[in-house]
Amino acid sequence: MKSPSIVILGAGYGGIMTAVKLQKKLGANDAKITLVNKHDYHYQTTWLHENAAGTLHHDRTRLKIADVVNTSRVNFVQDTVTEIKPDEKTVVLENSDLSYDYLVIGLGFEAATFGIPGLEEHAYTINNINSSRLIRQHIEYNFAKYNNEVEKKQERLNIVVGGAGFTGIEFVGELANRVPELCKEYDVPRENVRIINVEAAPTALPGFDPALVEYAMNSLEARGVEFKIGAMIKEVTENQLVFEKDEEREEIPTNTVVWAAGVRGNSLVENAGFESNRGRTPVDGQLRPKGYEDVFIVGDCSLIMNEETGRPYPPTAQIAIQQAEFLADNLAGKIRGGGHEEDFVPNIQGTVASLGDDDAIGVVFDGKKLFGWQASAMKKIIDNRYLLKLGGLPLVLKKGKLNFFNF
Amino acid sequence: MKSPSIVILGAGYGGIMTAVKLQKKLGANDAKITLVNKHDYHYQTTWLHENAAGTLHHDRTRLKIADVVNTSRVNFVQDTVTEIKPDEKTVVLENSDLSYDYLVIGLGFEAATFGIPGLEEHAYTINNINSSRLIRQHIEYNFAKYNNEVEKKQERLNIVVGGAGFTGIEFVGELANRVPELCKEYDVPRENVRIINVEAAPTALPGFDPALVEYAMNSLEARGVEFKIGAMIKEVTENQLVFEKDEEREEIPTNTVVWAAGVRGNSLVENAGFESNRGRTPVDGQLRPKGYEDVFIVGDCSLIMNEETGRPYPPTAQIAIQQAEFLADNLAGKIRGGGHEEDFVPNIQGTVASLGDDDAIGVVFDGKKLFGWQASAMKKIIDNRYLLKLGGLPLVLKKGKLNFFNF
């Protein structure tokens, strides 16, 4: 009997963890495992805002897939997925086709720009290594240009971040730390630089405890971040952003708009014909989309409901990793016998938002609130634990966040 | 009797060395010395190509004027010169006017673009800290953009340098070393990047010994530099450079043209009414322009003839420094009695062109040719000797090139 073929699309949190766990749980003859990814590296999406701000080098954020995946057990294909055909049990790549017995989709998110005029053309997004590195360089380039122009252009020094959700807040926290360094590097007075966060909702970090939100805003404002809360972005052009707040229209001259206010699941998922809402597909307790027994979706492309609140869980690395571990158990069980009986339920252990290198806010599983360096240490512990799961202690030592004591 | 007032314009090699030497030779009551400079720092123009390539940080190249000039003895004015009125013995600055008894002009060079269409608008120049830092960032920005575009644009990775004189050759030497680092940083294959040097003359490094020129070109070509010798640049646009060679027209797609093929003296000098040829004013043995007993010109704005060849000496740091030392002696002599009897004659001790960190070519005073690491070490010794003169051993230790042993 031919061993079944498992194809995993994407080496993000969900995809790579599925591959790493499966290679441990399955024997060499149990299944043929193929992992497909665009690049030969995995990266931690939750660190990209640091790469974009320039406070952490992107090589700290990424790791070679071959360093954590045993490529003699898992067939790694570096290629780009162009189409998923679930009824033909086939995936189309740019350079080949793959057929599967079991498909795991972990294709991550895309930016959602909600049709705001000019946003897609002119705003930068913290999506991946390439786009984050470009933001870092774009900001530096504008600082470098500033002093080379006789007529000084304020739009070079105004950085506008759209969205005060998790990514937006974490990014301005890093920027607030980075800007004084940039000012020194490019001989620009700090008071000439503005960091402006524009958020449409009536509060920053919606869903977070108000006391924590206040702490976060105070910490960021003390470092020079300006907040425009309840402000709708109306238009972005090459050198300005227009927003409306309290029925007043305001224009900010800027060459640098970073859009961190909306994500959606990968379009390939809805193009495949799965029921989906902005690229996120509702999955059952076994992480399967409706109507398919052999397809599993993990991470940002999957949508699971929080029974307590009646609303979907927001997509996080935490959930993607838990889904991957659950799925690897489940698939190994299906193949070797003894699969899961129970449904997947996320076990939310806490949520921490970084405000820069040594400051953060967070809530841990028992509802306890954390501030400042304790929350920051907590965040680093979470990040290191992930690396421990993925590649053991050597990976933690190589790529972990071990700078606990710089406060 | 009121002590005379000496005004020094520019804190380049000539200006700052004049100030430093005068503060040693004159007593506090002998003269009032004022040094005017746009920035509060001095920089080594001969190192700027390294800042532009990104192989040396610009903070290594510059030093605070107040760190080498005794500001209790020399009045430092940070301002920009807008006009020199030698008949009124006055200098107009952006924010004030200065009158003088003796004027020392050391205002350096500007790029000369010879009316080549598009060069002034689209080419970058290695003129000062700001413009060199911008080149570094411009190149990095294009590398960062490359991977973010679906349709790859070769013009982002083609770097064209106009001119294979001293600066052009030294710059491509640094670039050849830098590009592999950039490729790693931005995930770009090295073979996709081109470094192209375009020179109108029939040889690179005109005036240099042909054996040394051949060594230099071999060293650079081995590191991937392409030479277009005898090629006239016809036009530069935002994303291409057109040149003509052997009556054939060729277009290179490029966003990055660095113009290193022509300099002229500062326009302020010819605007002042001194006889001048492209901003360079012929000076007598006392470094004075014709008709003025109280004006001295040092460095790139002065023109002195080489009696042996019947042609002007090319402007170099070496000559500027020697002029400054001569002039400081001379002026101190005028003021305290016992000035120079003899005329200024440059003492050319050698010429070394760097080809990157550990390679160079050079000719020393006795005509001996140097290659490779010996020439490279010679260059570093010259640079360190200048720092020694300017600020003593502490400055050599702080800003010197002490990495002799990395070959």
Image (cartoon, coloured by chain):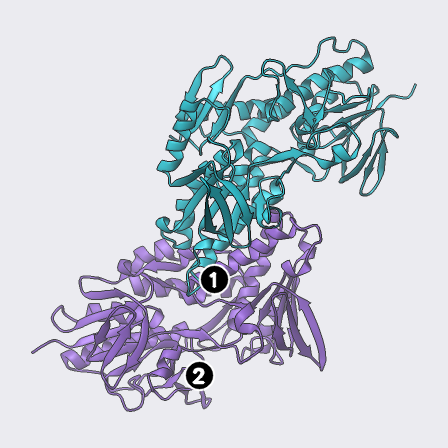
Chain colours: A cyan, B purple
Between residue B391 and residue A202, name the one nearer to us.
Answer: A202
The residue indicated by pointer 1 is B132
Q: Are marks 1 and 2 on the same chain?
A: yes
Q: In which quarter of the view is residue B219 placed?
A: bottom right
Seen from the viewer's position, the closer of residues B36 and A253 is A253
User: Is residue B35 among what the camera can see?
Assistant: yes
Disc 2 chain ID: B
Is residue B183 placed above or below B161 in the rendered structure?
above
Please tell me in which quadrant of the rendered image residue B270 appears.
bottom left
In the shown orientation, is residue A240 left or right of residue B93? Answer: right
* Residue B2 at x, y percent in the picture: 9, 77
Residue visible at 65% across and 14% down in the picture: A345
Q: Nearer the viewer, residue A320 or B107?
A: A320
Label 2, secondary structure: give it: loop
Density class for disc 1 (Cα within 10 Å; few <14, some 14-19, many ≥20) is many
Question: Can residue B403 be seen in the rendering of this structure?
Answer: no
Residue A297 vertical placement versus B401 (above, below) = above
Q: Quadrant of the C terminus of chain A?
A: top left
Residues at marks 1 and 2, CA–CA distance in whole angstroms: 23 Å
How many residues crowd mark 2 within 10 Å: few (<14), some (14–19), many (20+)?
some
Residue A239 pos. (x, y %): 51, 54
Examine the rendered structure and indicate whether residue A267 appears above or below residue A142. above
What kind of residue is marked 1? Ser
The picture places residue A210, in percent across and down from the top left corner, at 43, 23
1 or 2: tag closer to the N-terminus? 1
Q: Quadrant of the N terminus of chain A?
A: top right
Which residue corresponds to mark 2? B278
State the SS at label 1. helix
| Residue kind at label 2, given as amino acid type | Arg
Q: Are marks 1 and 2 in contact (CB under 8 Å)?
A: no
Residue A150 on image: x %, y %:
42, 65
